[in-house]
Amino acid sequence: MKKLISKIITVSCVMLLSATVSAKTISIESLNAKSTVKIKLYVLDCGTIQARDMSLFNPLLSTRKPMNMAVPCYVIKHPTKGILVWDAGLQDDIAKSSHGVEAHQGVFHLTVKRTMLSQLKEIGVEPKNVTYFAPSHLHLDHSGNANYFTQSKLLMQNSDYQLAFSKDAAKYGFDVNHYFELKSAEHVPLNGDYDVFGDGSTIILSTPGHSPGHQSLYLKLVKTGDVILSGDLYHFAENRANYGIPVWNDKKQTIQSFAKIDHILDNTSASLWIQHDPEEAKLKNMSPNFYD
């Protein structure tokens, strides 16, 4: 276990970066501004991770209690400005194994019941027609099918992008095999928050800590209300409640990101969607149904 942790734990300092857009923080006023743009949000089932050692996500938790964590992917359809895919789940190839596969020396067990590709087809989306692809980060359960989106604009914080194609990728738990084809994709080098469609409906929030360029997504849904897709800032409700910090996180960055999201939640009407939380996942209206 110590060998695993030392392999995937992140170093505490952030790389010095160049060629990024100016750092930007979206204001609370901008987040509170009403949107009349009727985007649609689809929630796809992109697998399940059985985590067998929960102390990796919070050292204060018991190591004996496994958890089957949800692995969703999301599709956001804008009425006039295209399609955004948020996260790419576990690899579709895992679906070929009826019993799933082991990962990280048996610490995780991965299963996929329905492929991402089949679910995209069900809602009339072909990867080549996806306008933007934005992974919250590039761990295996968020980048498994990333190579589908080589023709999309890649929306990533430049800190993660630079690491992803460097010799240090594995130190951050990134497996380049899952996303190597994105090297040829057009990359919008983010350094902070970013308004995806330029109309305030869909905003990437910089929330580093789980990876140097980890990001979350703020959506303004006209009927449903505002929601924040948390990526891996939190993994399940208990860790959100007690601010548990996974062993591989940068602690200082994570605490700052917790504070940022708390500030947004305290000062907007947004609801927090914890992507991996298994109980929350049971309540979601899954694709081909959608939120609007």
Image (tube, rainbow, N blue to C red):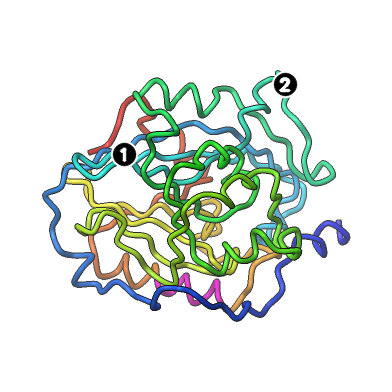
Residue 6 appears in the picture as rendered: yes
- Residue 228 location in percent, x, y? 36, 55
**Local crowd size for mark 1, using a 10 Å CA cut-off: few (<14), some (14–19), many (≥20):** many
The front one of 245 and 120 is: 120
- Magenta stretch in the rendered image: 253-260
Residue at 47% across, 70% down: 258
Examine the image and state in which quarter residue 2 appears. bottom right
Three-letter code, disc 1: Leu
**Local crowd size for mark 2, using a 10 Å CA cut-off: few (<14), some (14–19), many (≥20):** few
Residue at 56% across, 42% down: 146
Residue at 75% across, 58% down: 170
- Residue 7 location in percent, x, y? 81, 61
The front one of 32 and 14 is: 14
Name the residue carrying label 2. 97
For the residue labelled by badge 1, is the local secondary structure a helix, a strand or a loop?
Answer: strand
Is residue 9 part of the magenta span, yes or no? no
- Residue 186 location in percent, x, y? 46, 53
Is residue 257 part of the magenta span, yes or no? yes
> Magenta span: helix, strand or loop, mainly?
helix
For the N terminus, the quadrant is: bottom right
